[in-house]
Image: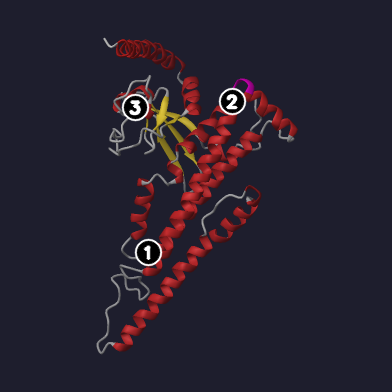
C-alpha cells in the first residue's frame, strides 16, 4: 500500500478527534503541477531557441528552477502551516494527558470520577498516549516523504534547507520534549499494576539504557524511525537531575539551567533575560518556555535511586542557601539597608 493512501486511512480513523494533518495528497498535486509547468516551460524555450539547450545537471528535463513561484509560494507555506498545526496539537494533547496522569489531591479524585461517569477503563491513559505517539510518528514520516519527493524535482536541495528551518524553529515533532515525556510515561507504567499488554506494542523497543554509565532513552518508533535521547547534562556532565527541557529542545538539570541563565532557583527560569543563551546551541530566549520533565524525573529516580538520593541531599543544601540569601536581600531592600 502506498504511503499516501495509508496516511489518509489513518487520519480517517482519527476523524472523531478532529486532529490536524499534513495535506499529503494536496502537496503531491502541487509538486506535480510544478513538474508539469517546468516541462512545458523548458519545451517552449527549446522550440524557440535556434540552438539546443543543455539539460539539467542531473540529466532530467523536469527539474524545477532555482526560484519557483509554485513551490516557494505554495508548497512550503502550506507544509509549514500544516506542520505547525500538527505539532501544536500534539504538544497540547500530550500536556493535557500527562497533567491528568500526574494529578494529585482533589484534581486526581475529580478525574477519576469523570472517567467512571464516561465509562473509561484503567487503560484509557495508555491508549491515548499510544495514539498520540502513533500520530507523531506517521506525521513525521509524512513530512520526510513529501520533502524527499520535493528533492527529486529540486536539485538544489531546498528540502534540506526547509528541514533545517523547521528544526531551528522547534517545529520538528520528533524533537518535542512532550514526546520524550510520553516515552518515559509508558516505561514508568511497566512498573505499575496497569495492564498494558494490549496497548504497549508500540513501546516494546523503548527503554532506558546505560552506556558506560551514561543514560539515554532509546526507542524504535518504527522500522525507519529510531530515537536516541541523551540524558547527560552538558553542564555538570552527570545524569540530569530534576530535568528541564529548554525551548530549543536541549535537556539540563534544573539547577544547572538556572546557573546558565544567571537566575536563582527562587526566581526560576522564567526570570532569565531574553538574551540568555542555551549552553549548547547558543540560541537566545529559550528559558521562559522551559518544560519540567516530570515523567522523566520519575523514571530516573526509580532507575538510579542511590544517585538520585545523593543529588537530592546535595541540592537541598544549595537550595536552602540560595533561598536564605534571596530573602535576606529582599529584607535589606525593604528596610533600605
- Residue at left offset 66%, top offset 30%: 195
Q: Is residue 308 magenta?
A: no
Which sits in the foreground, 38 or 269? 269
Q: Which mark is residue 150?
A: none
The rendered magenta stretch, by its main secondary structure, is classed as loop
Q: Which quadrant does the C terminus fall into? A: top left
Contact, mark 3 vs mark 1 (Cβ under 8 Å): no
Crowdedness near tag 3: few (<14), some (14–19) or many (≥20) residues, C-alpha within 10 Å: many
Which sits in the foreground, 282 or 151? 282
Residue 76 lies, in percent from the top left, at 41, 60
| Residue sitting farthest toward the bottom | 50
Q: Which residue is mark 1?
A: 72
Q: Which residue is mark 2?
A: 103
Residue 18 lies, in percent from the top left, at 61, 50
Contact, mark 2 vs mark 1 (Cβ under 8 Å): no
Residue 191 lies, in percent from the top left, at 58, 24
- Residue at left offset 51%, top offset 56%: 22
Which sits in the foreground, 331 or 131? 331
Q: Earlier in the sequence, mark 2 or mark 3?
A: 2
Q: Secondary structure at mark 2?
A: loop
Q: Earlier in the sequence, mark 3 or mark 1?
A: 1
Q: CA distance from mark 2 to mark 1?
A: 46 Å
Res 232 visible:
no
Q: Secondary structure at mark 3?
A: helix
- Residue bounds of the magenta highlight: 102-106
Q: Which residue is mark 3?
A: 257
Q: Earlier in the sequence, mark 2 or mark 1?
A: 1
Q: Secondary structure at mark 1?
A: helix
Q: CA distance from mark 2 to mark 3?
A: 26 Å
Residue 300 lies, in percent from the top left, at 46, 23
Which sits in the foreground, 24 or 148? 24
Crowdedness near tag 2: few (<14), some (14–19) or many (≥20) residues, C-alpha within 10 Å: few
Amino acid at each position: 500500500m502506498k504511503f499516501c493512501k495509508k496516511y489518509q486511512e489513518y487520519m480517517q480513523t482519527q476523524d472523531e478527534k478532529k486532529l490536524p494533518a499534513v495535506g499529503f495528497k494536496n502537496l503531491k498535486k502541487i509538486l506535480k503541477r510544478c513538474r508539469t509547468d517546468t516541462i512545458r516551460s523548458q519545451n517552449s524555450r527549446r522550440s524557440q531557441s535556434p540552438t539546443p539547450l543543455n539539460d539539467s545537471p542531473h540529466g532530467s528535463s523536469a527539474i524545477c528552477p532555482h526560484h519557483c513561484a509554485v513551490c516557494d509560494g505554495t508548497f512550503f507555506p502550506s507544509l509549514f502551516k500544516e506542520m505547525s498545526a500538527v505539532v501544536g496539537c500534539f504538544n497540547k494533547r500530550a500536556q493535557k494527558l500527562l497533567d491528568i496522569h500526574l494529578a494529585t489531591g482533589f484534581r486526581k479524585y475529580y478525574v477519576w470520577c469523570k472517567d467512571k461517569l464516561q465509562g473509561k477503563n484503567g487503560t484509557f491513559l495508555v491508549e491515548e498516549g499510544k495514539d498520540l505517539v502513533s500520530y507523531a510518528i506517521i506525521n513525521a514520516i509524512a513530512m520526510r516523504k513529501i520533502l524527499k519527493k520535493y528533492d527529486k524535482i529540486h536539485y538544489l536541495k531546498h528540502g534540506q534547507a526547509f528541514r533545517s528551518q523547521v528544526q531551528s524553529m522547534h517545529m520538528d515533532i520528533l524533537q518535542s520534549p512532550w514526546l520524550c515525556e510520553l516515552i518515559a510515561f509508558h516505561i514508568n507504567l511497566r512498573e505499575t499494576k496497569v495492564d498494558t499488554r494490549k496497548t504497549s506494542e508500540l513501546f516494546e523497543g523503548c527503554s532506558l539504557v546505560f552506556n558506560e554509565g551514561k543514560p539515554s532513552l532509546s526507542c524504535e518508533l518504527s522500522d525507519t524511525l529510531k530515537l536516541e535521547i541523551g540524558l547527560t547534562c552538558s553542564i555538570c556532565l552527570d545524569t540530569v537531575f530534576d530535568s528541564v527541557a529548554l525551548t530549543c529542545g536541549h535537556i539540563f538539570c534544573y539547577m544547572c539551567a538556572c546557573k546558565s541563565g544567571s537566575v536563582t532557583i527562587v526566581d526560576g527560569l522564567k526570570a532569565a533575560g531574553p538574551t540568555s543563551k542555551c549552553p549548547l546551541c547558543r540560541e537566545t530566549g529559550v528559558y521562559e518556555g522551559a518544560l519540567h520533565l516530570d515523567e522523566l524525573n520519575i523514571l530516573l529516580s526509580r532507575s538510579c535511586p542511590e544517585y538520585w538520593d545523593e543529588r537530592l541531599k546535595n541540592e537541598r543544601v544549595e537550595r536552602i542557601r540560595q533561598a536564605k540569601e534571596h530573602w535576606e536581600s529582599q529584607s535589606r531592600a525593604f528596610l533600605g539597608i
